[in-house]
Image (spheres, rainbow, N blue to C red):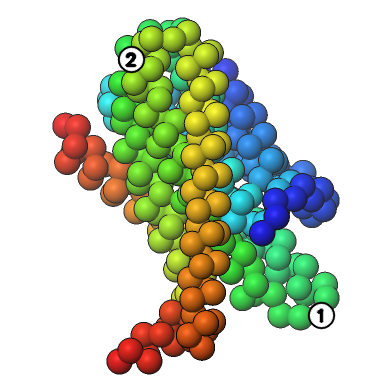
Amino acid sequence: MLLRFAVGGVVVSVFALLGDLLKPKSFAGLFGAAPSVALATLGLTVMKNGKAYASLEARSMVLGAVAFMICAWLTGRTLIQRRTSVLATTSAAIGLWFVCAIGLWFALIR
Amino acid sequence: MKIKIDTSGLKESKWYEYLIRFLFGGLVTATAGIIAKRYGPEIGGLFLAFPAILTASATLIEKHEKEKKEDAGMQGAVRGKLAAGVDAIGASMGALGLAAFALIIWLKLLDYRTAIALTIATIAWFFTAVLVWKLRQVIGKRIKARFSVSGVHSAAELRRNRS
């Protein structure tokens, strides 16, 4: 678990750093949705649980990514049009991600 | 809009801001592993696409933009929110690339060596995200051009004129 934590922290930080280096902001934002957690995890998962297990995880990840797209887009539109608090809006977006991801999973996979 | 590398963003960031991202990243990765172990790969997999640094990035961008404006003697609150909003829209385009990444791993991991599958999927993430970003730029430009030809300057104005 400690290895996962360290690898995850490093991979996420590297992609975030890449985002800091790039302009314009909308392009840099692409790196906010980099597959950092997946890259840090999938290799270790294959070694421990095998490819079939990792492949099943990736199937659910597609739905997680769709939920990410919905919540990030709504966050962006809300901040630009309504100029709400950034912390409150992004925190609400995390909640929305949970609802969308679990909802999609229930509707399409379960 | 041209894509540029600008190192000034690195100077604005403080060491603890990098530490926060590292901790968030590590925490989410470890939690995804724990959830997969407890509830199985189907639920655990959802968390591979968890918006790990959405909140941390947006608040940092807001802070930096606000400070920049205030250093120039102007109000920076609105600018900070707009910059964070634009970054989040970028992340939503990146998330489409993330879906492409996951799709490739799901369908091809069993056929290829893990390292090769991960490399192909990462390349697919990058090109899908950039393609969507570019398409949005082109479509945005065309819509702007159409509005300016018809003497209308925004979508809201167009709706008002129609009604």
Q: Residue at x 77, y 47 (%)?
A: B5
Secondary structure type for disc 1: loop
Q: Nearer the viewer, residue B129 or B59?
A: B129
Q: Position of residue B77 (x, y in %)?
A: 64, 74
Q: Position of residue A91 (x, y in %)?
A: 45, 56
Other-residue count near label 2 (Cα within 10 Å), few / some / many at <14 / 14–19 / ≥20: some
Q: Is residue A22 left or right of residue A29?
A: right
What chain does mark 1 sit on?
A: B
Q: Nearer the viewer, residue B73 or B37?
A: B73
Q: Is residue A42 left or right of residue B35?
A: right
Please tell me the numbered disc located at residue B73.
Answer: 1
Q: Residue at x 36, y 11 (%)?
A: B110
Q: Looking at numbered disc 2 in the image, what kind of residue is underneath it?
A: Tyr
Residue with the mark numbered 2 = A53
Give above or below for B154 relative to A88.
below
Other-residue count near label 1 (Cα within 10 Å), few / some / many at <14 / 14–19 / ≥20: few
User: Can the viewer see residue B58 in this picture?
Assistant: no
User: Can the viewer see residue A35 in this picture?
Assistant: yes
Q: Residue at x 33, y 15 (%)?
A: A53
Q: Looking at numbered disc 1 in the image, what kind of residue is underneath it?
A: Gly
